[in-house]
Image: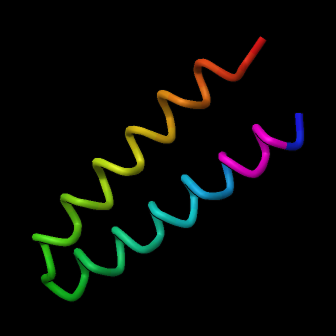
Amino acid sequence: MQLIRTVSGMANNLNQIARRLNAFGISALNEEFNALKQLIHELMKRLKP
């Protein structure tokens, strides 16, 4: 259960970073963060019982 919380927190942090990058117009990095966020969500799906 702790692992799922940790991964979820990572996804939330990445989402916040992506939003800030987008706000400053740094869209190239925003795409990279969105891809990482998607990978974390896929990992969470696999970890949930």
Q: Is residue 4 above or below residue 10?
A: above
Extreme residue toward the right, this view: 1
Q: Does residue 1 belong to the magenta stretch?
A: no
- Quadrant for residue 21, please give it: bottom left
Check the picture and name the quadrant holding the N terminus.
Answer: top right
Image-based side of 11 in relation to 36, left or right:
right
- The residue at the point 12 percent across, 72 percent down is 27
Image-based side of 32 in relation to 25, left or right:
right
Q: Nearest the camera: 9 or 43?
A: 43
- The residue at the point 23 percent across, 67 percent down is 30
- Quadrant for residue 33, please give it: bottom left
For the magenta stretch, what is the residue range? 3-7
Check the picture and name the quadrant holding the C terminus.
Answer: top right
Q: Position of residue 10 (x, y in %)?
A: 60, 58
Image-based side of 5 in relation to 24, left or right:
right
Q: Position of residue 6 (x, y in %)?
A: 75, 51
Image-based side of 40 in relation to 5, left or right:
left
Q: Is residue 8 above or below residue 24?
A: above
- Quadrant for residue 13, please give it: bottom right
